[in-house]
Amino acid sequence: MAAASAGITCPHCNARTQQALFCQVCGLFMADRTGTLQRVTYNRRFFGDWLLEGVLVLVTLVVGWLIWLAFTAQTSQTPAKRILGVYVLDAATGVPVSAGKMWMREVLVKWLLVTLVNAVIGVGGLIDALWVFFDKDRQTLHDKVASTVVVYAPAGLPEEFAAASPQPIARQVTPPMKDLAEQLRELARLHEQGILTDEEYEQKRSELAGKL
């Protein structure tokens, strides 16, 4: 689990820290053994991430931003986060979120949450963004709802944190009938010459027959 238990020792600076996703002393992500993932600064989280994202949405007329998101979501980022070198991780597991969860976080949770809060008090977006100033892990309200956390990785995510790509399934290639027939004839010849015993011949012949 990414969240630290109360009083746990930071694996990076050995400081005793309170329960948090980031060490409250050195600011590094507790679940990262490489010590390269940092807690985002207030400036990068609010002025960079929130304001820049809004500008990009307006400049690209929303549609362009959504198309852009289709590419950045694959690396657990939004367009603004790609520019700033920050990534979205699952707060429960500490691994990069999938592209599907990025869409859920940005389009469903964030936009719907802001819309609902706006309907009640009219400043939902601002409250959502300002939440980072009161949260020890720099999470917004939509981070809390989506169970995500944002980390700063100037050199990119460490290899062990990179989203695993599905490995292609190896296909069993069936030998052509002509090759099988030639192999059977060769087995028969070796058997007739006494090179293969009856048992060896039957075993190999059965193996070849199984490939048909």
Image (tube, grey):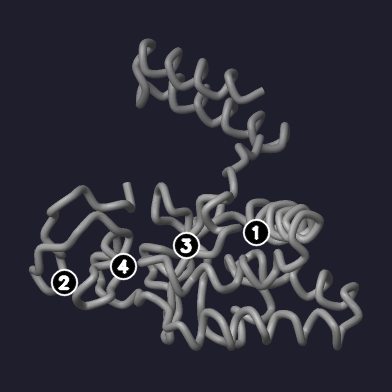
Image location (x, y in percent) of residue 171: 62, 41
Query: Comparing marks 1 and 3, which lies closer to the viewer?
Result: 3
Q: Badge 4 local density, few (<14 within 10 Å), some, or many (20+)?
A: many
Above or below, comparing residue 209 to residue 182 in the picture? above
Mark 2 to mark 1 CA distance (whole Å) = 29 Å
| Residue that carries the numbered disc 2 in the rendered image | 12
Q: Secondary structure at mark 4?
A: loop
Upstream in the sequence, badge 1 or badge 3? Answer: 1
The residue to which callout 3 is attached is 149
Pointer 4 or 1: first along the chain: 4
- Kind of residue at badge 4: Phe
Q: Is residue 72 left or right of residue 195?
A: right
Task: Indicate which disc residue 29 carries.
Answer: 4
What residue is pinned by disc 1? Answer: 102
Q: Are marks 4 and 1 in contact (CB under 8 Å)?
A: no
Mark 1: amino acid: Met
**Compared to 47, does 63 lie above or below?**
above
In this picture, residue 102 sits left or right of residue 10: right
Q: Residues within 10 Å of mark 1 (few under 14, many from 20)?
A: many
First of labels 2, 1 by sequence position: 2
The CA distance from mark 2 to mark 4 is 9 Å
